[in-house]
Amino acid sequence: MTARSAFARLSVRDLAQIAIFAALIAALGFPGALSLGASTVPITFQTLGVMLAGAILGARKGFLAVLLLLVLAAAGLPLLSGGRGGLVWFTTSPSAGYPYGWLLGVVVIGALTAWLLPRYPFWPALGATVLGGIVAVYLIGVPVTAINLGLPLWAAAVDSAKFLPGDLVKVVVTVLVAKQVHRAYPGLITPRRTAPVSLPAVDARA
């Protein structure tokens, strides 16, 4: 499916949701970023917006919301945390891999969430958000940090542990918020699982 056909299938409501979540992720970058440790990769609230986009909008719309933000940031708009923007943050920066990790992470969260709906149980939802919001993001972000800083992979991985406490809090917040949203507005994500089909009873005496 081409990008043009993907957008062609979206309704006005879908486009509005994508724009709103792109703006939300950008707004979560306004407080700025905190840099700790050796890698100078910033700690930011924007990953919370990425997790929420996947858990509330689903894989396709969540992906497009994150992609919209990243395209605008790459074009130079100061939409990344701390008012950053431009191609350098997607190429040679120590944190260059994390935006690409967001794209993978939002798809993982959205796809797994679709399997959990309509019930969206807490612990499975927590696991799905950890897989997408932490594991998938780090899977791309950490190796790129190691490459751009010339660090051993293990050193970049150890340094990334500074993100874990905050990211785990964001996971819990995401699940709690998404659960309430899906309860109030069912249908934002189409469930992947369908109710079992009941077959008509067969009379054994026939």
Image: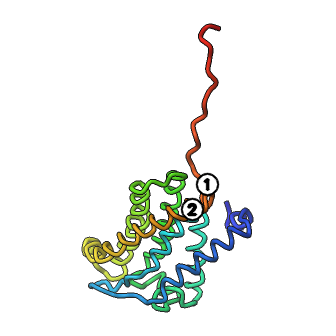
Decide which of 183, 110 is in the foreground and name it.
183
- The numbered mark, 1 or 2, whose residue comes first in the sequence reads 2
Q: Residue at x 56, y 46 (%)?
A: 193
Residue 22 is situated, as x and y percent measured from the top left of the image, at 58, 77
Decide which of 136, 43 is in the foreground and name it.
43
Labelled disc at residue 21: none
Q: Residue at x 63, y 57 (%)?
A: 187
Asked if residue 129 is positioned above or below residue 167 in the image, the reply reads: above
Q: Which residue is mark 2?
A: 58
Amino acid at the residue labelled 2: Gly
**What is the C-alpha distance between the residues marked 1 and 2?**
8 Å
Residue 49 is situated, as x and y percent measured from the top left of the image, at 50, 75
Count residues near mark 1 (Cα–Cα under 10 Å), then give few for <14, some for 14-19, many for 20+. Answer: some
Asked if residue 186 is positioned above or below residue 177 in the image, the reply reads: above
Q: Is residue 94 left or right of residue 54?
A: left
Q: Which residue is mark 1?
A: 190
Decide which of 70, 110 is in the foreground and name it.
110
Q: Residue furthest top?
A: 205
Residue 46 is situated, as x and y percent measured from the top left of the image, at 47, 79
Asked if residue 89 is positioned above or below residue 14 in the image, the reply reads: below
Name the element at disc 1.
loop
Q: Residue at x 68, y 71 (%)?
A: 15
Determine which quarter of the picture holds residue 36. Answer: bottom left
Asked if residue 39 is positioned above or below residue 63 in the image, the reply reads: below
Is residue 59 visible in the rendered image? The answer is: no
